[in-house]
Image (cartoon, rainbow, N blue to C red):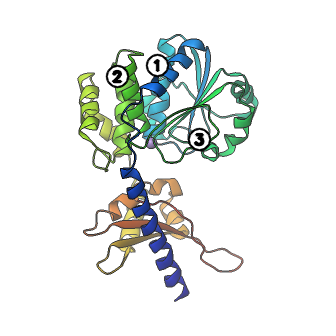
Amino acid sequence: MGLKFYEERVFYEATNRYFHFIKSKTKDRSYLYRMKEFQQLTELIQKNTTFVLTTHVNPDGDGIGSALTMHRILKAHKKQVTIINVSETPHYLRFLDPEIVIEQFDVQVHTEKFASCDVFMALDFNTVDRMGKMSPVFSSIKGKKVCIDHHQNPQQVFDVYVCSTYYCATGHILYDYIEKSGIVPFTFEYGEPIYAAVMTDTGSFRFERTTPEVHRLAAACLEQGVDPTETYRKIYDQNPFGKMTLLGQALSGTELFGENGEIAVMTVTQQQLAESGMKEDDTEGFINIAMSIARTLICRQIWRRRTQKRGRYPFQRRKYV
Ligand SMILES: [Mn+2]
């Protein structure tokens, strides 16, 4: 009984946070003119030579796509630029980086690069802890620190912010920047990573920030030769069979709470993970499938771990939708 009560309590917390998020989002009118930030960014690019870019731990399509887009903008301006990520590029996003310009963080090799670069850019995250085990190098950076991101409440540790929750993805910010600043002509080499960034962060053009402007962005990418069918297939149709059997188990164990079943609870056990041969990261997207249950507004995915010592079931927050 204790377990049930705890589950319900955390789900009501999740509900409150969700409505707070929606309320705060509608107040954001700061997107109307981003030109000041875009001019700052252009000046930084023009006046400096060495750049280090990074995205968050466990990068998604937006993180990888944005980093590659900025890398290509800087290369077009003959800058020295390195992308250093803490996690390796997920296999389904490697087609975006055919020349393998993204490097994975190595303390020995990269510490000096962070310390000595003219400009450091954080793409698709806004707090230092999202750099995972790479976080300690942040304080060694002597150059300008730039945050380019679309999440709420950026940490006050950067020198320049190109941030607004108006945008559906960091790739959307970069598209707007290219369009408004004319820093580079918009071609396929920017269109492909930007399309992947926006497609993944909007849940394939269906989440709330999918505006007419976002569809015009998609149209511009297609005009440059991006193939929507192929891009989707490369990113999403890559599931190992074990992931599908795990999804089946997670769905058959899903429970509904609330008066009309507005809250869905999906549980994945460590035993199920082990049996399917999958890792926690492989459950990415499960929550969206639970959200497709009619009338469900909130879903939370729970990890149930049985600790050897006490035989308890601690919970870990996974994701709010
Ligand atoms: Mn993003």
Q: CA distance from mark 1 to mark 3?
A: 23 Å
Which residue is at 74% across, 26% downward?
112
Q: Which residue is mark 1?
A: 73
Question: Does 204 sit left or right of 82 as displayed?
Answer: left
Which residue is at a point 34% across and 45% down the rendered structure image?
202
Give the secondary structure at mark 2. Answer: helix
What x and y, as percent, mark residue 305? 59, 71
Q: Is residue 177 left or right of residue 118?
A: left
Q: Is mark 1 within 8 Å of ligand 1?
A: no
The answer, for residue 147, to whether it is visible in the render is yes
Look at discs 1 and 3 and give the one toward the viewer.
1
Label located before the other in sequence (2 or 3)? 3
Q: Classify mark 3 as within 8 Å of ligand 1 or not, answering yes or no.
A: no
Q: Quadrant of residue 168?
A: top left
Of discs 2 and 3, which sits in the foreground? 2
Distance in Å between CA atoms under marks 1 and 2 = 12 Å
Q: Given the image, on which type of amino acid does mark 1 rest?
A: Ile
Circle 3: element type = loop
Distance (Cα) linking label 2 and label 3? 30 Å
Q: Which residue is mark 2?
A: 179
Above or below, 159 relative to 129: above
Horizontally, residue 236 falls left or right of residue 114, namely left
Q: Which residue is mark 3?
A: 87
* Residue occupying the point 45% across, 74% down: 12
Looking at the picture, which amino acid does disc 3 mark?
Ser
Q: Position of residue 181 (x, y in %)?
A: 40, 19
Q: Is residue 255 or residue 252 the one in the foreground?
A: 255
Callout 1: helix, strand or loop?
Answer: helix
Residue at 64 percent across and 47 percent down: it is 129
Ligand 1: quadrant of the figure = top left
Mark 1, residues whose alpha carbon is within 10 Å: few (<14), some, or many (≥20)? many
